[in-house]
Image (spheres, rainbow, N blue to C red):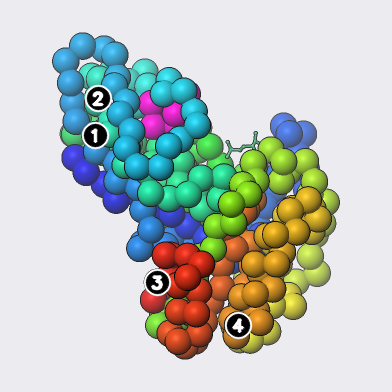
Amino acid sequence: MRINANCKINIGLDVLRRRADGYHDLSTVMMPVVGLYDVVEVVPIEGEENEFHSLGLVVDCPADQNLCIKAARLMQQRYGVGAVSITLDKRVPFGAGLGGGSSDATAVLVAMNDIFSLALDEQTLIDLASELGSDTAFFVRNTPQLCEGRGEIMTPVELNLGGKWLVLVKPDEGVSTREAYAGVKPAEPALSLTERLAKPIEEWQNSVKNDFEPSVFAAHPVIADVKQQLIDAGALYASMSGSGSTVFGLFAEKEKAQQFLSVTPFIYQL
Ligand code: C5P
């Protein structure tokens, strides 16, 4: 079975507080970007040992630590299913805040649910995905969601971005999730993210923020420059996605978005 495991962007990301378990409570809206995806192929094989093959972008991670293999092992342990061979064609930049690895892992869960006819319901898949990471649960639904808690408590949201042009720019410098959380200063906003997002997009720039930006921009001025370029080029809204380093811009006009064709291939109409 083949799945196009698409990535996501975060529109607003409030880091509310640090928790006793070391994680942080978040409030963020995640939106799928269906045009940019890894291709994950999962086929059942004989024996108990899973196989992992990778193509495309080179992932700097030993195969047995890849989240895809962890997802396969989780399904084997939980449901006693057989082994699989996973081929990952990696196209989504990593260290990017786009959730590529999380999406791949969820794709393996969904594929194995189908291949082994487990008939697991959505909530069970969400619970399994949450065991593998914090962004993974989102990809079970893969529609715009307000994500709270560690990221796994989801409520569907309407965004009304249809027709807008999305430009994703991934600077050469990556940011690790660990680095981003180390620099963040948690704070509770006066108005909820949902309330701020309900205002016209033209008002978002001053109110819909990504709390990772201040420390990440201080350490990587190049990323801040990209955001400023998107704003200067006429973006209605620009922000870093997740823990970075990808920055995205939302444009009303195709021509303005396409000014970035020399900088990035990742330009999509929503
Ligand atoms: O869950 P995931 O593997 O994506 O998270 C990587 C790291 O990011 C965690 O070990 C934790 O330090 C941090 N994190 C956090 N709060 C979250 C999500 C992640 O502190 N809500």
Report whether residue 123 is seen: no
Mark 1 or 4: in front is 4
Q: Say which residue appears at 63% left-offset and 62% top-offset.
A: 240
Instruction: Examine the image and state in which quarter residue 43 appears.
Output: top left
* Residue range (magenta): 65-71
In what quadrant of the picture does the N terminus appear?
top left
Q: Secondary structure at mark 4?
A: loop
Q: For the residue marked with disc 3, what is the amino acid? A: Tyr
Q: Which residue is mark 2?
A: 84
Q: Say which residue appears at 66% left-offset and 69% top-offset.
A: 227
Q: Which residue is mark 3?
A: 268
* Circles 1, 3 touching at the beta carbon (< 8 Å): no
Q: For the residue marked with disc 2, what is the amino acid? A: Val
- The alpha-carbon separation of the residues under discs 2 and 3 comes to 33 Å
- The alpha-carbon separation of the residues under discs 1 and 2 comes to 6 Å
The crowd level at tag 2 (other Cα within 10 Å; few <14, some 14-19, many 20+) is many
Q: Secondary structure at mark 2?
A: strand
Residue 91: image location, x then y, percent: 38, 49
Above or below for 89 versus 230: above
Q: Which residue is mark 1?
A: 42
In what quadrant of the picture does the C terminus appear?
bottom left
* Circles 1, 4 touching at the beta carbon (< 8 Å): no
Residue 70: image location, x then y, percent: 42, 26
Mark 1 or 3: in front is 3
Q: Which disc is residue 233 wearing? A: 4
Q: Earlier in the sequence, mark 3 or mark 4?
A: 4
